[in-house]
Amino acid sequence: MTRFTVAIDGPAAAGKGTISKAVAAHFGFAHLDTGLLYRAVGAKTLAGADPIAAARSLTPADMQGNLRTPDVAQAASKVAVIAEVRAALVDFQRNFAARDGGAVLDGRDIGTVICPDADVKLFVTASAEVRAERRFLELSAKDHEVSRGQVLADVIARDKRDSEREEAPLKPAVDAVIIDTSDLSIEDAVAQAIARINAAR
Ligand code: DC
């Protein structure tokens, strides 16, 4: 097989990462979590770097380390509004999408901006409350001292910033299939995604 691109977008903690990993494993596709690119830029910015310079000089090493913290998530969402930051990350994502053997990219603007010609576009979402509860359980399991209220407020703030920005706002592509995971098990959500991809192959 040559190229086959699956674009998976959606708000924070909707289940994109879990679905993307499962889909990539099922079909033997490569997977890129594009949020990590913005998290890496966010982390560098928290450490004092200029966000645009950080995005332009990003290396794979910058993607290592603990980028899954609430502070880095908010910093990522803030640098993601900057057009020059987004522009610096486009080629890497498009090259990844075009690799032989198939690729799954998950993020906010994959189906709309990065890969508008993706073979399959999924928009994975869930209510803010369900997403906040999932994120709360995830962070608590990693010993982060967080309250449910704070996590919900963070999720809502990030949704608002990600959807209201001018550059590549979070929104479903017109041809995206919406998967609402609020009342779905992981297995059912993954099965729906796999069924959509099988239908397009
Ligand atoms: O998917 P994530 O939670 O790791 O993403 C962190 C932030 O990065 C998110 O709040 C907005 C930004 N982001 C983006 O603007 N575009 C993407 N394709 C992926 C992430």
Image: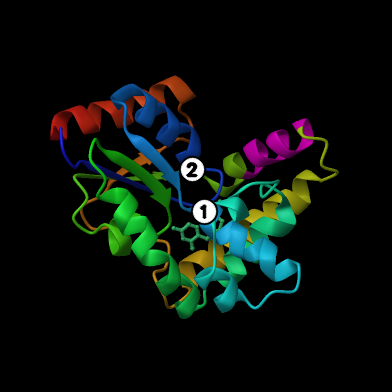
Q: Quadrant of the N terminus?
A: top left
Identify the residue position indicated by label 1 in the image: 35
- Whether the magenta-drawn stretch holds residue 194 is answered as no
Q: Is 171 left or right of 78, judged from the image as shown? A: left
Residue 47 in picture, x, y percent from top left: 76, 67
200 shown above or below 40: above
- The amino acid type, in three-letter code, at marker 2 is Ala
The residue shown at (42%, 62%) is 170
Label 1 lies in ligand 1 vicinity (Cβ under 8 Å): yes
Can you say which quadrant of the picture contains the C terminus?
Answer: top left
| Residue range highlighted in magenta | 132-141
Q: Is residue 139 rendered magenta in the image?
A: yes
Can you tell which mark lies on residue 7?
Answer: none
Residue at image location 76% in from the left, 44% down from the top? 148
Per the image, label 1 sits on a secondary structure element best described as helix
Identity of the residue furthest to the right in this view: 145
> Which residue is more in the foreground, 94 or 184?
94
Against 163, residue 104 (above or below) is: above
Q: Residues within 10 Å of mark 1 (few under 14, many from 20)?
A: many
Query: Relative to 121, is 85 above or below?
Result: below
- Separation of disc 2 and disc 1 at Cα? 18 Å
Three-letter residue code for mark 1? Gly
Residue 14 appearing in the image: yes
Q: What element does badge 2 sit on?
A: loop
* Residue 181: image location, x then y, percent: 45, 35
Q: Nearer the viewer, residue 138 or 32?
A: 32
Look at mark 2 in the image and give the residue it sits on.
126
Mark 2 within 8 Å of ligand 1, using the beta carbon: no
Q: Quadrant of residue 130?
A: top right
Are the residues at dot 2 and dot 1 in contact (C-beta closer than 8 Å)? no
